Image: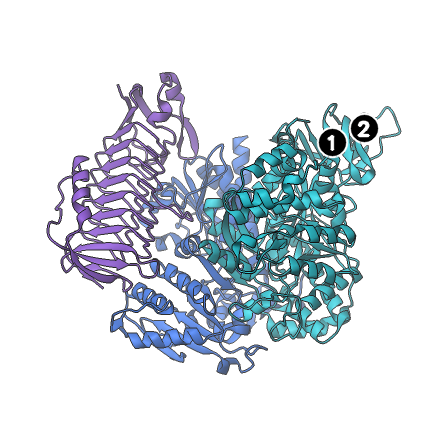
Chain colours: A cyan, B blue, C purple
Amino acid sequence: MIPEFLKIAGGTVYDPANGIDGEVRDLWMSGGKIVEAPSDFETRPARTIDAKGLVVMPGGVDMHCHIVGSKVNAARMMCPEHGEIIPSTTSTGLRYAGLGYTTAFDAAIAPLAARHAHEELVDTPCIDRGFFALMGNNHYIMRAIRQNEPDRLKAFVGWLLGASKGFAAKLVNPGGVENWKNRPEGNARDLETRVDHFEVTPGQILASVAWAADELRLPHPVHVHTLNLGLPGNWTTTLQTMKRLEGHRAHMAHIQFHSYDGGDGDESTFGSKVGPLVEYLNDHPNLTVDVGQIVFGPAIGMTADGPVGHFLGRLYGTKWYSNDIEQETGCGVAPIEYRNTTAVHAWQWAIGLEWFLLARDPWRIAMSTDHPNGGSFLAYPRIIKLLMDATFRKDALAALPAEVRERSVLRDLDRQYSLSEIAIITRAGPARMLGLTNKGHLGIGADADVTIYTPDPDPEVMFALPRYVIHRGRIVVEQGEIREATRGRTLHVAPDYDRGVEPDLQKWFESSYSIRWRNYPVEADTIGESEVVP
Amino acid sequence: MDPSRTVDDRRIWPDSVCTACGCLCDDIVVKVKGDRILEAQGACSIGEGHFLGNRRGDGPEAWIHGEPANFDEAVERAAILLAGASCPLVIGLQECTTEGHRAAVELAESIGGGLEVPGVSATILSLQSVGEVTCTLGEIQNRADFVLIWRADPVRTHPRLFSRHVLEPRSDFLPGGRNDRFLAVVDIRETTTLKEADLAIPMDEGAEVEALWLLRALVKGIAIEAEQIAGVALKDWQALVERFRAARYGAILYDGRSNGLSVRGIHSLVRELNERTRFVVMPLHSGGNGVGARNVLTWRTGLPGAVRFVEGQGPLSSDAGLPSATAADAVLVVSGNPMVMDNEPTTEVRRKIPRVLLTGNQEPHPQAAEVVIRTAAFGIETSGTVYRMDGVPLPLRAVVASRFPTVEAVLRSIEHRVRERRA
Amino acid sequence: MALLLRRTDESDLPIEVIGVRPDRLRGMPPAEIGRFPIRHGNRTVPLAEVFQIKGDPSDERIDFEGNLRNVHRIGAQMSAGRIVVDGCTGWHLAAQMSGGTIEVSGDAGDWVGAEMTNGHVSICGSVGDLVGASYPGSRRGMTNGTILVGGSAGAEIGRSMRRGTIAIGGACGDHAGLGMIAGTILVFGSCGRYPGAEMRRGTIGLFGGGPVPLLPTFRRAGRFRPQFLALIERELRRTGFAGVDWPSGKLDLYHGDLLSLGKGEIWTREGGGLA
C-alpha cells in the first residue's frame, strides 16, 4: 500500500528541540509520524494544509494535571456546581485538543485504583496520556527502607509501575500522609520526622525512590510533591528536599505551592522565597520543576496529600472529601476560590510568575496550573500572555493588594518570553523532562502531534484558538471546530525488575490488602491502545 | 488473562469476585464442570446462592409482547421504540460492567434520552453538601480500633464483612485482631449485628436524626438539656462519645440505602470527629455494580446522578432538573430482576409507558415489558470491571459461558439499529 | 399590551421555556418570538410549535395560559418585567431570577425561586420541594427577594438561603430552612420535622399552632413579643399576602442550630416548641 501523506506547507516552525526557531518549512507526516519529504517529487500528499503566515509547533504536553481516576471523579460527584473545572473525560480530551495539547499526564494515581484511572484514560479522547503512580507512603517501600534493602525497594518500584501500568514514580508528602492516617494532626514537618510504625524518615523515602527510579532507568525521574505544601515558611523544606535529591534526577512538582516565606505566626510575613530556590534550581541541572500557577477564580484542591485536603476544608469552611487508601496513600478534595483581593492568593499568583521569570533555563521549568488545583488548564493562554507581555503583567500586578505589589520582585522583572521559549515550557521541555523522545518536537520519527496557530498581537487570543491541531497525523481541530475525536494512546512503562522479590511481596500483599494479589495488576485489555515507553 | 486451570474434567477459577453483596469478596474459588458451577469455595451463604443458583438459561432469547422472538427482531423493535420516543429513559445499570455503562451512555446520547441509576441519592446529596471522609476497606481492616455500625445489619446482609475487613483481621497496627477493636452498634431493633456489639444502643424508631444531632453536639462539647434522646439516656450517648474520643482510627458504617437527613448527620459527625481524632465513614452498599454505574456515568458525562441528553447540547443534569421518570415516554431497563418495575415507587406511572427490559435472570417474565431481551447472567457469565462499595475496582471474570449476549453487546446492537434508522 | 402564550395541546412531555422572559423578548419582532427555541422532550422546537402567540411584550409582560403543569422554568433567570400565569406550572419557576414579578394562580412544582437573587414571586396554590433553595452542591440558596405561597409547600424550603423572605400560607414539609445562612421563613400551617437544622442565622416563624418538632440543638430563649413581625406583616399584606392568621400575642423563641453558629431564631406560638 502506498502511504498517505499529510503535508503542512510553508508554516513558520518553532521546534526548539531541533534548534528551529521560527523558520519557514514544510512538514510531512504519514502513519502517525513525522517523515522525510518523499524523495519522489511526483508524490502528492493526500492533503496539504497551507500554513503560510501561520505558526507551527509540536502539540502541547501537560506534564502535571489531575484529570482522571477516583479523586477527580469524587470531585465531579461532590462539586456539580464546579463542573466547568472538572468536566467529563470526553470534554477534558476535547478541551486539551482545543488548546493545542496532545499529551497529558495525571500526576497522582493510587495503584490500588489504577484500573479505575485507566478506564477513564481510555475514555479521554484526542490525547496520549498516562499517570504517575503514588508511592511516597507505600508500606512496602517504607519497610524495605527500614530493613535497609535497596534492591528489594528497587524491584518493588519496578513491579508496582508494571502492575499498575503507570508511567513514573510519584511521591506526595512522603511519610506525612502515613502519619496523618495514623493519628490526628499527624504529619511530617521536616525531612527528619519519624514515620510512625516504620521508623523511617521522609528524607530516606525521597532519596531511596529517587535512586530506584534512576537505577530502573525510568524515562521520567522521581516526581516529587514534597512536605508542607501550601504552608507559610515551607521554602526551607523545599530547599532541603532539593538538596536531599542531589546526585539523582528529580522533578519538583507545582513548585509555586512550596516557595513561601513566613510561618512565624505573623500573617504579614507571608511572601515569596522564590529567590534562593530558583538560584538552587539554576545551579543544579539534575532538577526540573513545573510551576503550578494559580489563576484567580474557582479551583478545586485535589491531592493525594490527605492532610492538605483537611487543611483546605477547614481553612475555607467548605465541604471536604478524604479517602485513605490502604498501604498506599491518602486523598483530599476541597473547592477553593482564589481572589485577587486576598493577600495570600495574590502572593501565590505572583510567586508562580516569579518562578517563570527567574528560572534561567526554560528547558527545566514547565507550564502547569496543577489543574485543577491552581485553576483550570484552560488558563494556559492567559498565563502565556502574562509571560509574553510585561505591560499586561504589570497592569495585573497593579490590581493586587499593596503588600504584594510592593514586595514582589515581579514589579522589577521586565523579561518577556519569546515564542520559542513558550514552545519550550509548553511542549519541548515537558516532553524532554518526561523522557518522551517522540513528543515535543517535529523531527523525523516524532509522533505527528502538531499545533498550528494564527499569529495575533494578543498571545492569549493566539494560543486560545489554534487553527489546526493534529494528533498522530489526524486532524483533530480545524478552524476551532472538532473534526475528529481521535482515540489516543496510554503511555506507560514496563521496567525490568528482579522477580525474585515476588514471593515475599505476595505474602505481604495477601496479609495487608483487602483484595487478592492476583486481582491487583491491570491487564492490557483494560487500557486500550497503548505504548510502552522505554 | 485467564487464571483458571483444569483438573480432570473441572475448571477451577481462583480469586473470583462475588457480586452478591457490596463486599465484592474476590477470593472465591469457583469450580465448574461444563457449564455448571459445582462449588464456590469461600463464599458465604448469599454468595453460594449467587454462584450455585446459576443455571444455564434455556428458552427463547427474547420476547415481544410476551411472544418468543429472535434477537434481531427484538433489537429492531427496541430501536424503533426508543428512537421514536421524545423523552426516553435508560434506568437500572447496577448489573453490568464498565463496558455496559459506556454503551448505555452512548445509547442514551443517540436516542436523546435520560440515564438514571436508582438509589443512594442521600449519600450523593450529603457528599455535595458536607463532603465525605472515607477510606478503602483495607484501612478499616488494618487500622480501625473502633467501629460503629449505625442502623445496619451487616452480619446478615454482608456476611463476610466482619471476618474479612472490619472486626477479625490482625494487622501490624492491631496485632490482637478482634481484641484490639471495639464494636458499637446503634439500631432500632434487635439485629444479629447488635448481638456482637461491645456496646449496643437500641434506640427508638424515627428518632435517628435527633440522636445524630445530639451526638454531634456532645462531640463539639455543646451542653444539651435533656434526660433522654431517641429513647436512650443521655449518659448512654455520652458513653458512646467517650468511645469516639478514645479511638485512634474510628469507622462508622451505615446502610447505603438510608435516606433523609440522617446521612448528612452521619457524614457531618465523622467530619467533626476528625477535629480530634481520625474517623472515616462508609455506606454499606448492596450487591451488583451500582457503584460502578455511578462512577462511569459521572466520568462519561461529568455529572453525578441522573442525566439527560437533549438535541444539540451536551449532557444535562436532571438531578435538580425534571421529573424524568414520570415524564418518560419509553423506558429501557437494564436489570437482573425479571419484574424490576414492580419495585419502583413510580410503578403506576411507568407501567403505562412502553418498556424494553434487558435481563440476565434465568427465568424472566416474558410479559415484564413490551420487549424482553435476555443477557448473560451478571457476575457469572460476564467479564469486565466492577467497583466495590469503597470504590476499589476489581476484575470480574466469566466462569461459565452464556448462550446470551452481554448487556453491552445488546445496547450496542440497539444503538447501531437506531443510527441506521436515522441514516 | 402583554404577550400572551397559550398552550393548546395536552401532551405530558416536559417543556422548558428557558429564556422566555419579558426582559429577553422585549423588542423582538413577533416572527422572531415565534421562532424562539424552547425544549420539548429531547428536541429543540420553536416557541410557536407549542404555544399560540398573541400580543407583544413591549410593556414587559408575558401571560401564560393553558395546560402548564409540565412547562418548566417559567421566569427562570428573569431580571425585569412581569409574568402572569393562569394555571399550574412545572418546576424551576422563577429559579435564579434577579428582578421583576411573577404571579401564578394555581400550583407550582419543585425549585420555585431556587437561588433567586431578587424579585417577587407569588403563588396562590401550593408548591413542591426546595422553594428558594440551593441547587445540588451550591453553597447558597436565594440571596434576596420574596416568595409568597398561598397554599402549602414541600420539603427543604429555604435550603441554604442567604437573605430574602419565604412565606407559606399553609403547611410545609420536613427540614424547612436546612442550613440557612440568614433570611426569613414564615409558615402559617403545620410544619414538618427538623426545621432549622444547621441554620446559622435567620428567622423561622412557625405559626401553625400545635407542637413544633425541634432538634435537641435548639435552646429555648424565652417568650417575647417579636418586634420584627409587625413590619413583615405590613409589608406582606401590602403585596397581597392575605388570608392567614398572624399571631398577635407573645411568641416562644428558640435559638439554634447550636451545631452551626446558633444565631438562628425559631418563633412559635406559645408552647409550640417541642423537642
Residue most toward the front? A406
Residue at image point 58% right, 39% down: A397
Mark 2 is surrounded, within 10 Å at the Cα level, by few (under 14), some (14 to 19) or many (20 or more) other residues, namely: some
Above-or-below relation of C198 to A460: below
CB contact under 8 Å: marks 1 and 2: yes
Indicate the quadrant containing the N terminus of chain A: top left, top right, bottom left or bottom right. top right
Total label count?
2
Direction from residue A36 to residue C176 in the image, left or right:
left
Q: Can residue C259 be seen from the camera position used here? A: yes
Q: Amino acid at mark 1?
A: Val
Looking at the picture, how far across and down is residue B168, in whole percent? 51, 78
Please give the chain letter of the residue carrying mark 2. Answer: A
Q: CA distance from mark 1 to mark 2?
A: 9 Å
Marks 1 and 2 share the same chain = yes
Give the residue at mark 2. Answer: A25
The disc at residue A399 is none
